[in-house]
Image: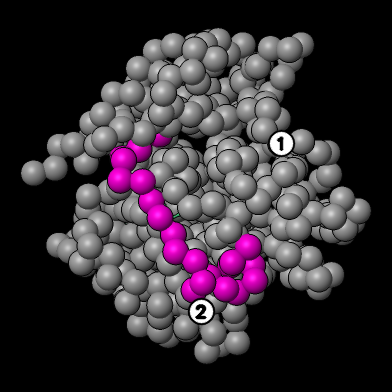
Amino acid sequence: MKVLVVGSGGREHAIVWKLSQSRLVDKIYCTPGNAGISGMAECIDVDSADFSALVDFVRYEWVDLTIVGPEDPLSRGIVDAFEKEGRRILGPSKAAAQLESSKVFSKEFMKRHRIPTAEYKVFSSYIHAEDHVRMKGAPIVIKADGLAAGKGVIVASTVDEAIDALRLIMKDKAFGDAGSRAIVEECLKGEEASFMVFTDGKTIVPMVSSQDHKRVFDEDKGPNTGGMGAYSPAPVITRELESVVMETIMRPTIDGLKSEGIKYKGILYAGLMIDNGKPSVLEFNCRLGDPETQPILARLDTDLMDISMAIADEKLSDIEIQWKKDASVCVVLASGGYPGKYEKGKIISGLDNAGKMDDVVVFHAGTAFNNNEIVTNGGRVLGVTALGGDIKAAKEKAYEAINKIHFDGMHYRKDIADRALNRK
Ligand code: AMP
Ligand code: GLY
């Protein structure tokens, strides 16, 4: 079978890597891909925003299935465009993807279906939002309604900070139309975890749990990033808690959408806050997380193409999904300056030496070729991922591999997975 993967990050490299092990797949295309992906797939130059060009490509090349990595094409209706032309694609429709693309939709949906989430109010007038913030006090959370590349959420520890955030979103329109409406939300406390499921709209199968590290520096200091590392499993998600999340969040979400005439197919990701064993939803994403996908797919023992086809054909109940007992840790190596300004084009050395290690995979994110050399081409550059008998062993292996890799300005967190290791 032939498969097309849409995207260019570490998540997409992990998807392509897993598909390359499939007994069903004999050809993988990726658009636009990156240097690492190009070793396993044919990277093609079709604009992923041009859905009719993509449909033409899959029709012409007889591609059996398209898998979409990032939220942007999903929120703009890539799945609807493919399905209208009778093409098999993995991901939710534009209507279903609103769970991620509109935080107002998502919060109102959760309220209607009594899915646990923080108290909130929606504002389209700046002045009313400011009054509300002054009345509530800090800490408080401000969110732009629409997609803002992960920058539209500000957890404010003072009223001034919250008002600055409102001004940035609603007055300065820093995120354009995404800021026409803003949410002012209660600040939850607890421990965060990422919980993802495969679903065909009927059957829902949880993946193994994981935990992301959003802040750029050790001990969760510094600004938020796309994610500096992740590990799996996350001990905060116990077996009991997994059942609670399935029963109080995942099942009511898929069924609630269905009751509103929206079928959800693909991957559903809930960012959770867990306080005293009680989960609340911080956000929904309509796709795999990045970097959580890297350690999670490293643990997947079932053929990803089998799973993907079963979801697309709505036969997920027919297959059983198996995971390795091993733990896994992914550490992101970032460009100097990230998540602020950074330079590109730095030569990366040591990739072969690190990649040769047993149970280590170096997933590429922002990388490109320059005269046969692999160079940096983005903020998050690599996701060094290792498996081990437990989290401690996986962590040690990941950092051992990192010691072999170098590029100018490279920085990374030294404490990925410590939260799991330091648990009492
Ligand atoms: P989101 O994009 O909604 O997941 O928000 C990004 C990050 O902001 C989350 O991973 C949390 O760390 C934080 N956050 C979002 N909402 C809340 C909340 N209600 N209380 C505390 N932290 C939050
Ligand atoms: N790692 C968080 C996300 O993918 O949104």
| Element assignment for label 2 | loop
The three-letter amino acid code for the residue at tag 1 is Ala
Asked where in the image residue 29 lies, by quadrant, the reply is top right
Label 2 CB less than 8 angstroms from ligand 2: no
**Render colour scheme:** one colour
| Element assignment for label 1 | loop
Q: CA distance from mark 2 to mark 1?
A: 32 Å
Dot 2 alpha-carbon crowd within 10 angstroms: few under 14, some 14 to 19, many 20 or more: some
Query: According to the image, label 1 marks what residue?
Result: 41
For the question of whether residue 323 can be seen, the reply is: yes
Label 1 CB less than 8 angstroms from ligand 2: no
- 261 left or right, relative to 187: right
Query: According to the image, label 2 marks what residue?
Result: 202
**Residue 76's disc number:** none
Residue in front for this viewpoint, 220 or 138 = 220
The three-letter amino acid code for the residue at tag 2 is Lys
Q: Position of residue 242 (x, y in %)?
A: 28, 65
Q: Position of residue 311 (x, y in %)?
A: 58, 67
Segment tinted magenta in the rendering: 309-330
Give the mark nearest the N terminus, 2 or 1: 1
- 398 left or right, relative to 287: left
> What residue is at 81 percent from the left and 71 percent from the top?
86
**Furthest residue to the bottom?**
259
> What residue is at 26 percent from the left and 29 percent from the top?
393
In magenta stretch: residue 312: yes
> What residue is at 65 percent from the left and 16 percent from the top?
374
**Quarter of the image that includes the C terminus:** top left
- 165 left or right, relative to 40: left
